[in-house]
Image (cartoon, rainbow, N blue to C red):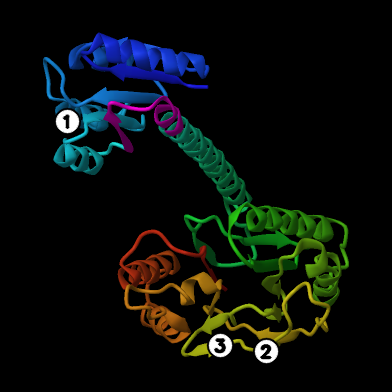
Amino acid sequence: MGKVLVIDDDRTIRMLLKLILNKAGHVVLEAFDAKTGLSVAEIESPDLILLDLMLPDINGLNLLNAIKSNEWLKKIPIIVLTGSTDQENKLVALRSGAVDFITKPFLHEEVLLRVNTQLKLHSLINSLENAVSHLEKDLMAASRIQKSLIPSYPPEGYFDEIHWIYEPSHKVGGDIFDIIPIDDNSVLLYVADIAGHGVNAAMLSVIVHRFIEDYCDNHPDFELSNFMLELDRNFRFNDFTLFFTITAALFHRESKTLELTNAGHPAPLLIKDDMLELKEPAESIIGIDMLEGNTKCYTISPGARLFLYTDGVTEAANDRGQLFGSERLMKSLFEQRNFQLKEQLENVFNKLKTFTGNNEFEDDISIIGIQF
């Protein structure tokens, strides 16, 4: 049942509508002119307004426009009461935001049918808006959780410099990365990208992050191949209905070697005097039981820079549907190679924003740069 405000200067009409609506269980409020009607609406916040277009103080259409311009009242549905020959005003009222009209003289059944229909629609709209509001709060919470997992500062002693750009999408995605010391000589770097968007992807990224932390804590004899096989065993698509890609690299400080593995993720980039795309090894994505645990070692020369990134960077599109692409990313990084690492990343990120023409991205943007 709803709260209905009747605004009509004809006392007989108000009494008749009140009788009809009260009998159906609705609460009826009355106003005999526009000024009183607007005041009652602001105080009582009715669920529905029945508005006569012929009022003694203000034209009903002007009151309709005033209500629809009011931030607190504009969502209230309004049914206009009109004479049978008032066709033009009916159309103007509907164009101004009225949801329906009732022609005088009216039938009891027609009044109830139109009022009940609009009250049901209004209730459904309110329920939908509340659900969307709760969902938005959930997404905001998921986004905050994601951001809290990104390392606040890198471990010291393993690299000359390390910086990153991390820009979560407005949809909440599933990028996650970390730098985890294994022992005094070696450190694990990884970047993972959970497929899809929304709370499910965000929460799976949290679970993956936690799993990797625990695994590193409990395996002092850490081996990169076994680590990847264990990931694949524990995050099967059948259990989570989501898969993810990951690049993981184990850097050994004394030998200056980088042991690399890649499960369906964009290939890391290594820059010194030229650009090298580390395409090997290339493994299957995590979760479909096709991983072999292959790794490859690369010798790292002093001053070299390694870049790990997610496909949100290369698949960012402009308004013509063109992708930023890996070639454009490599060219941008190489052109900026003589800048300080942090400035290099910021310049490339600004190029990405200029290319897309947007500060909001459809997918998470993650780029991690390491200088050895």
Q: Identify which amino acid the numbered label 1 is placed on.
A: Leu
Give the camera-side residue of 310 and 278. 310
Q: Which residue is mark 3?
A: 277
Q: Which residue is mark 2?
A: 280
Q: Amino acid at mark 3?
A: Glu
How far is disc 2 from disc 3 in space, using C-alphas? 9 Å
Choose the circle earlier in sequence order: 1 or 2: 1
Residue 75 lies, with reference to residue 6, above or below; the image says below
For residue 186, which quarter of the picture? Answer: bottom right
In this image, 148 relative to 250: left or right?
A: left
Identify the residue at image location x=70%, y=57%: 204
Q: Amino acid at mark 2?
A: Glu
Image spot of residue 310 (x, y percent): 56, 71
Where is residue 59 drawn, in percent x and y?
Answer: 12, 24
User: What's the mark number on residue 111?
Assistant: none
- Asked if residue 94 is among those painted magenta in the image, a careful observer would answer no
- Which quadrant of the figure has residue 173? bottom right
Q: Are marks 2 and 3 in contact (CB under 8 Å)?
A: no
Mark 2 burial class by Cα count in 10 Å: few <14, some 14-19, many 20+:
some
Q: Which residues are magenta?
A: 99-113
The picture places residue 131, in percent across and down from the top left corner, at: 55, 40
**Eye-nearest disc, 1 or 3:** 1
Give the secondary structure at mark 1.
Answer: helix
Image point 74% across, 54% down: which residue?
207
Q: Are marks 1 and 3 in contact (CB under 8 Å)?
A: no
